[in-house]
Amino acid sequence: MGLKQSLYQQLVPEARASGISKLNLFIVGVVLASFLFLALETEPVLNTDPRWMLAFHLFNISVLVIFTIEYIGRVWVAGVDPQYRGFRGRLKYVTRFYPIADFLAFGPELIVMAMGGGGSLLVLRVLRLARLIKIARFVPAFDALGAALRRSSSQLLTSLAVALALVYVAAVLLYFVEGVGGAQQDTFASIPRAIWWAVATLTTVGYGDVYPVTPLGRFFAAIIAIAGIGVVALPAGVFASAFSDELRERRERGTSL
């Protein structure tokens, strides 16, 4: 029980009064290194070099082994918590959010690799992004961000609804002005095609690949572009306010980031 209790203190962030254990700090380092190697694997100069290919393969196997051992260890020590004792308790534990993310970080890729790999292994590499959640568990700032999102969820959904409505209205207007009448551009020949222009304009990206050419179309486009500034600023302001309130309340409670 002493060993299990010690590992529980090392592996479970909630079990520590403050700080991050050396073991979890090592896991964070492995996650960051895996992201670095994921980026390097996409470089044609490196992924065609036999030496680098061997290095990538050995590193990925090592990471999968480390995460497998860590996952098994977490499931084993979860029994220290009374609610996760026994078979049913462990089953309850592995169906929680963080354990599922831990499994997705290595499980599918390990299974496919054990079956011989293949093209599907390349697709499963995108699941490595689940390893970000492993880092989020150890950094309190991520918890504050999540709390701020939950706090402002209704306002953010309202902002999203306003943005979607404005996108649709903008697409309809430019369809009738530029697609049906005016210059009858192919890029505005339908409302779905016009939606691309509306999204690029309202998000203030403005690629310039699609634009109105008639005076009336440009007039509406100017109004829509100005409205887009407010559409982008609204959710940012809502989230910033919620995040500020969350940080203030945490300081009042004495909870550190």
Image (cartoon, grey):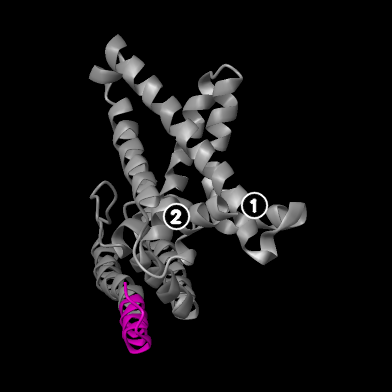
Residue shown at the point (25%, 73%) measured from the top left: 226
Q: CA distance from mark 2 to mark 1?
A: 18 Å
Measuring from the top left, give residue 157's x and y in whole percent: 48, 74
Q: Is residue 233 magenta?
A: no
Asked if the magenta segment contains residue 246, the reply would be: yes
Q: Residue 94 shows which numbered tag? A: 1
Q: Looking at numbered disc 1 in the image, what kind of residue is underneath it?
A: Val
Please state which of residues 213 and 87 is positioned toward the viewer in this rendering.
87
- Figure check: 81 above or below 125: below
Residue 186, compared with residue 168, is above or below; it is above
Which amino acid, mark 2? Gln
Dividing the picture into quadrants, the one containing residue 40 is top left
Query: Any mark on residue 10, and which?
Result: 2
Q: Quadrant of the N terminus?
A: bottom right
Q: Nearer the viewer, residue 28 or 184?
A: 28
Q: Is 117 displayed left or right of 81 in the figure?
A: left
In terms of depth relative to the viewer, which is nearer, 133 or 212? 133
Where is residue 100 drawn, in percent x and y? Answer: 58, 50
Magenta region, main secondary structure: helix
